[in-house]
Amino acid sequence: MGTVSDAGPVEHRVLVPPGVQGRLDALRPAGRYQDDEPVATIDGTQVALTSWWPVRKPRPYPHRLPSTAPLVTGQRVLDAVFPILKGGAASVPGGFGTGKTVLLQQIAKWCDADVIVYVGCGERGNELADVLAELAQLTDPRTGGRLADRTVTVANTSNMPIMAREASIYTGVTVAEYYRDMGYDTVVIADSTSRWAEALREFASRIGALPAEEGYPAGLASALAAFYERAGRVAGPGGREGSVTIVGAVSPPGGDLTEPVTAHTQRFVRTLWTLDRDLANARHYPAVSWSGSYSRDSGTVGSWYAGNGDPGWAARASRMVTMLAEADRLAALADLVGAAALPGPERVALLGGRLLREAFLQQNALSPNDAFCAPTKSAALADLVFDVVDRSGSSSRPAGHPATWRT
């Protein structure tokens, strides 16, 4: 029905509330109004700037659209190997000290979404205060202003009531759906769903519900599914297309990735970014494990890139995964007999894996040149690594020997 001026870098659009329809009887002229003051009348129903909606109920939409375009995060390991679609859902499981917070902040800062919703659920108060302070200081690379100006923060610390922590992620996704209906691409970053699940367990214990595995309520899987299924790309009111992308961090106790929250979450997300403690201890950041992560949307992303100027994306991603797996297989053998004792092809495979790890997958979040990497730059870096591997293989092959072993 109109827009709110001076509302920040994201144009705030006044929407007709869900369930309200009919003839527009009156619309007030441009001016200054209170949040709860009626600005329009539709078929006898007064509509204000403020919109109320129950957070546990998904906001309705005319119809759902297929997700085809990737969410560009600026992180090479995510965009080039384990991509996520706009309107998709991803999980980031990792133990303490593996770099979840920094990775989530990098996604919030550099992803090509219009609105960021950061949900701090059950975290320690001083840690959440640090996150809020850092968000306020971060510069928005899209507008040059503050990143906080297009970020909605839902803060629920560990000492808040159970129901506040339980409702926090629903509040965040409902806010994202509100901006989705305006026609924006939104990203919900939930840190962390493990603390939310602990609130569910505490509440179930107090009401005397029958506990399931590790004391969690029997409906934990259904609750996780209901949350992640609210991600998607839809055609909202007025035909505007918008999306909600959900990235949920999981903090398994002791780094146990077989515990119920992590195990159930993997059933409902299409992208998994597992953070490896050994990589973090080796100062390899982002510490995303290439052997424990996956993306079920790689084929869709490859088709999108093929139609948008990069037909070699799928082959490039497949070759990187193959090279990393082969290097991991040979690393154990090299530790026993030494790399010098291996044949030339195996030494080249080890070189390729090392180049990919150190020159491509590692990324410095504090470097102004390396904090963000565009897809074209990622493709160029990967092709350089492949060229070095191909040239090394050609030079080390005996004369007249066929090149059947080349990676």
Image: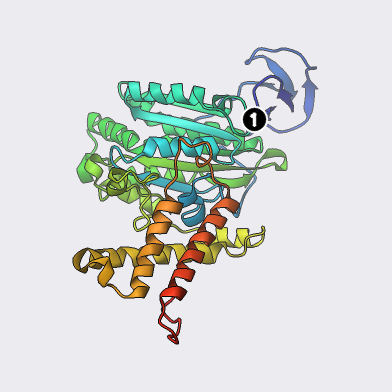
The number of discs equals: 1
> How far across and how far down the image is residue 95, in percent?
28, 41
Q: Using residue 407 as the reference point, say whether residue 239 is left or right of it.
A: right
Residue displayed at 66% across by 61% down: 307
> How far across and how far down the image is residue 205, in percent?
23, 32
On the image, numbered disc 1 is attached to which residue?
Answer: 143
Q: Quadrant of residue 406?
A: bottom left
Please say if 315 is above or below 364. Answer: below
- The quadrant the N terminus occupies is top right
* Crowd band around label 1 with a 10 angstrom C-alpha radius: few (<14), some (14–19), many (20+): few
> Nearest the camera: 351 or 333?
351
> How far across and how far down the image is residue 350, in percent?
35, 65
Q: Is residue 186 visible?
A: yes
The amino acid marked with disc number 1 is: Thr
- Mark 1 element type: loop
Q: Is residue 407 visible?
A: no
> Nearest the camera: 27 or 175?
175
User: Coloring scheme of the render?
Assistant: rainbow
Q: Using residue 10 as the reference point, say whether residue 282 is left or right of it.
A: left
- The quadrant the C terminus occupies is bottom left
Residue displayed at 25% across by 44% down: 255
Residue displayed at 24% across by 40% down: 253
> Nearest the camera: 386 or 127?
386
Q: Using residue 262 as the reference point, say whether residue 230 is left or right of it.
A: right
> Nearest the camera: 149 or 277?
277
Residue displayed at 31% across by 75% down: 343
> How far across and how far down the image is residue 57, in percent?
50, 36
